[in-house]
Amino acid sequence: MTISGHRIPMMASLIVWGLLWEIVGRLDLIFLIPPLSGIFEAGIKLVQTGSWQAASIITLRSFALGMTLAIGVGVPLGILMGRFKAVDNLMGLWVNMFVSAPLSALVPVLMILFGLGETTVVVTVFLFAVWIIVLDARAGVMQVPSSLIEMGRSYGANGWTLFVRIILLSALPEILAGIRIGLIRGVKGVVIGQILVSIIGYGELFELFSRSFEMENFWALTMILFAAAMLLSALIEIFEKRIEYYAGER
Amino acid sequence: MPQAVRSHVHIDAAATSDDPVVEVRGVSKTYADVEALRNIDLDFARGKLTTLLGPSGCGKTTLLKIIAGLIPASSGEVRVNGRVVTGPGPERAFVFQDFALMPWATVMRNVAFGLELRGVSPAERRRVAMQYIEKVGLAGFEDKYPHELSGGMRQRVGIARAFAVNADVLLLDEPFSAVDEQNRRKFQEDLLRLIEIEKKTFIFVTHSIEEAVYVSDRIVLLSPRPGRVSQVIDPDIDRSASPDDIRRAPAYLDTVEEIWDGLRQYAD
């Protein structure tokens, strides 16, 4: 973007919105919107507290556990569905139903099943992330060009060799794309799970801040979460680009 | 007239080759309700280039893949070096119409893939692959990836891969159809040169009459749906002449014309 000949950097709009926020905050119009400078101050103090650090560790742990399960189950299931019609028929309906279902509505049920604790959050992360991972792995395996499989067979590959050397490598870009979207959904899962359970991790902090009207802390925590989710997504994108050179090739 | 053409050759063509490396006996192929091939009998002479030529839908690629062992025949059998084909084997190598290169592997790894699967040591397969990369004119490109190459160069990789496994029979499925016209001629000339050096048996599928006459020792014309052998032609062309002279030789032009007459009945 350029204004009267000067190039304006992309992030400039953030400054404009930040200034606007600061002004509205200083005018003291609504208690919901404290000045931005106050939020930053609160944020710096917040990250030094033991309760924030403990909450972050719990959150990360639930996220990592849920994602490990989602990838560990999702990728093999997707590959099986792509390779075997019977598995596809058996699981297809469920995967397609859950991938677009409003899973937040299930969390209360999970609380009954798994209790008001970390397990429920882990299961929520898993349920948010796993379906898209399954679908993308399945699509990747089904999209392997038939001539590439014929090529492998004609040069002596079959069974396991064919699977590892041709099918898996050929499906890798889609599998990784599924994992990336799965990770982003997993972030939603961990936040929603914790907020609904509301006695552990960030959920507990959010509950505390909003109940005692500590708006600076509330906003600071929100911004930390947003930044973390964006950072995670950017990291995976960098990793994806490194193998993308052959994804566009087909 | 078509009847006369058909009866004209097909059995005695099989009988005259003295040393057939590939024998096709009574091969038929039926997909669900489509009859693709009916009762094909053919011999492919060792060290010769035979072309399967015909309009689209005549089953020429199907026949090639049956010989390759990639698709089973509905009835009949194929023998290679006297042994009945039950699947792909090391004595046959395939060149694919769409190249079928592994996009995640370099030219070197693609060319060496057949050797890698056979458990050849890395140093040895590098040496052999390099030799064929040079022969197909890709020296200096061995560390490039397929998407960095043009269509013609990609197919050269496919051909080098087929040569590298040192098979007796090379099966080429319309190898030039995805290569642009300017490169195709150069490619055909290079292929003839390679054929001369390598002394292998080639079975070549194409729908281009000129291409078939230009490269083949023998041309098998297939009729469409169901595919049957309708005519076998042995072009009498002096291959030692320069490429331009071959394309101007009366024998070349006459053979192209003869095939046209045979195929005209199938044109829409």
Image: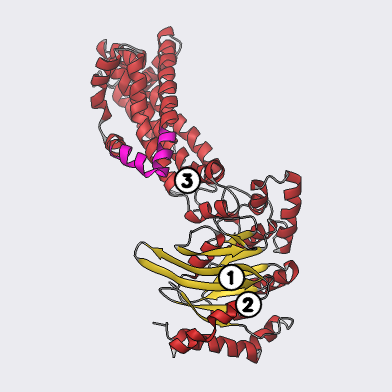
Work out how far the residue at label 1 is from the one at label 2, CA to CA, in angstroms. Answer: 8 Å
**Circle 1 residue:** B204
Give the residue type that dot 1 points to: Phe
What separation in Å lies between label 3 and label 2 (alpha carbons)?
A: 67 Å
Q: Is residue A220 left or right of residue B4?
A: left
**Badge 3 amino acid:** His
What amino acid does circle 2 point to? Ser
Within 10 Å of disc 1 (Cα), the crowding (few <14, some 14-19, many 20+) is many
The residue identified by callout 3 is A6
Residue B136: in magenta span: no
**Residue B181 seen from this side:** no
Q: Mark 1 touching mark 3, by CB under 8 A?
A: no
Q: Give the magenta part as a residue range.
A: A74-93
Q: Chain of mark 1?
A: B
Q: In the rendered image of this protein, does residue A155 appear above or below residue B39?
A: above
Which quadrant of the view contains residue B264? bottom left
Q: Horizontal placement of B112 versus A47: left or right?
A: right
- Residue behind mark 2: B216
Q: Are marks 3 and 2 on the same chain?
A: no
Q: Percent from the top left, x then y, of residue B47?
A: 69, 71
Q: Is residue A167 above or below residue A91?
A: below
Give left or right: position of B178 versus B119.
left
Question: Residue B34 placed where, x, y %?
Answer: 36, 67
Q: Are marks 1 and 2 in contact (CB under 8 Å)?
A: yes
